[in-house]
Image (spheres, rainbow, N blue to C red):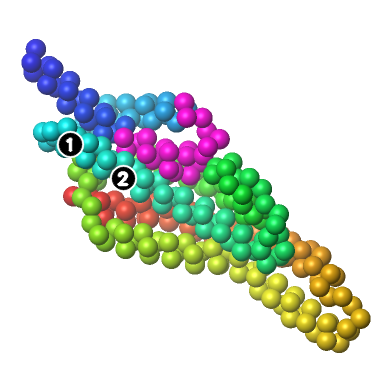
Amino acid sequence: MEAFLAQSQERFLVFLLILARVGAIFVFSPLFGSRSVPAQVKAGLSLIVAALLALSLRLSPPQVVTGLGLLLAVGGEVLIGIAVGYVGTLLFEAVQLSGEIVGLQMGFGIVNVIDPLTSAQVSLIGQFKFLMAVLLFLALSGHRVIVEAMGRSFEIIPPGGMVFETALGQHFIGMFGQMLVVSVKLAAPVLVALLLASFAEGIIARTVPQINIFIVGFGIRIAFGLFVLMLSIGFFVLVMTKQFSQLPIYLQEIFQYLAP
């Protein structure tokens, strides 16, 4: 009887640690972490996935002696889930940043909409690009990559076995810089076109001073920017397809920094 109780406690401990990691991934990952997804759905998915992983994976419980040790183990699992989920979220943040840059240059700086994911005001162009990225993410089975990363993370990092290294912070800083480069790439076609349009407006203002270029040019910049944005959709799909295809590589790098 005592052996059965001890075994039951070990299984419950493993399930608790799995649930902490899986729940954090569902809360902070793209799409799953959306505020439009009810909390009951997130909790239900976390429980189901955690139960399936606990039954399918033969994981040994960590050596937890005190309540403080259990608290640290659960906190470590939550940090792993946050790191895994935020890797995918960074890609969508880069998309929205590129849209905000383009919208500001086009004159849409005061035209904002409410983002259902964060309940914050975002650029109209940024929200348009974000929705395109979501459709592309689903078409490339990016959601399956996130779910598969949950199971693979337990094979690399057992429950309670996280080892935090200072190099992880440097790696995230490097990822922030890389996502900034991606956002500039996505905004580059429209920015270059608007730069040429500003150059043309300057020439017109010098040669034909009777035209109020500030009023006329405002509508021209919006129309020209939307036209170039439509032409650059193929470039957007090409860049984001490459980034989404590298998502497993990004996750593997995070696992290596957290693995014991």
Callout 1: SS = helix
Counting from the top left corner in percent of width and height, residue 84 is at 37, 47
Q: Residue at image x 27%, y 40%? A: 75
Say which residue label 1 marks.
68
**Front tag of 2 and 1:** 1
What kind of residue is marked 2? Leu
9 relative to 185, above or below:
above
Counting from the top left corner in percent of width and height, residue 170 is at 32, 63
Q: Earlier in the sequence, mark 2 or mark 1?
A: 1
Q: Residue at image x 58%, y 47%? A: 120
Q: Is residue 259 magenta?
A: no
Q: Would residue 232 be seen by someone viewing this image from the given angle?
A: no
Q: Nearer the viewer, residue 53 or 19?
A: 19
How many numbered tags mark residues here? 2
Q: Residue at image x 51%, y 39%? A: 34
Q: Nearer the viewer, residue 189 or 245?
A: 189
Tags 2 and 1 in contact by the CB under 8 Å rule? no
Q: Nearer the viewer, residue 251 or 38?
A: 38
Callout 2: SS = helix
Q: Would residue 30 be seen by someone viewing this image from the given angle?
A: yes
Say which residue label 2 marks.
79
* Residue sitting farthest toward the left: 2
Counting from the top left corner in percent of width and height, residue 136 is at 57, 49
43 relative to 157, above or below:
above
Counting from the top left corner in percent of width and height, residue 104 is at 66, 63
Quarter of image, res 217: bottom right
Q: Is residue 34 magenta?
A: yes
Q: Which mark is residue 153?
A: none
What kind of residue is marked 1? Leu
* Residue sitting farthest toward the bottom: 207
Tell me which segment is drawn in magenta.
20-40
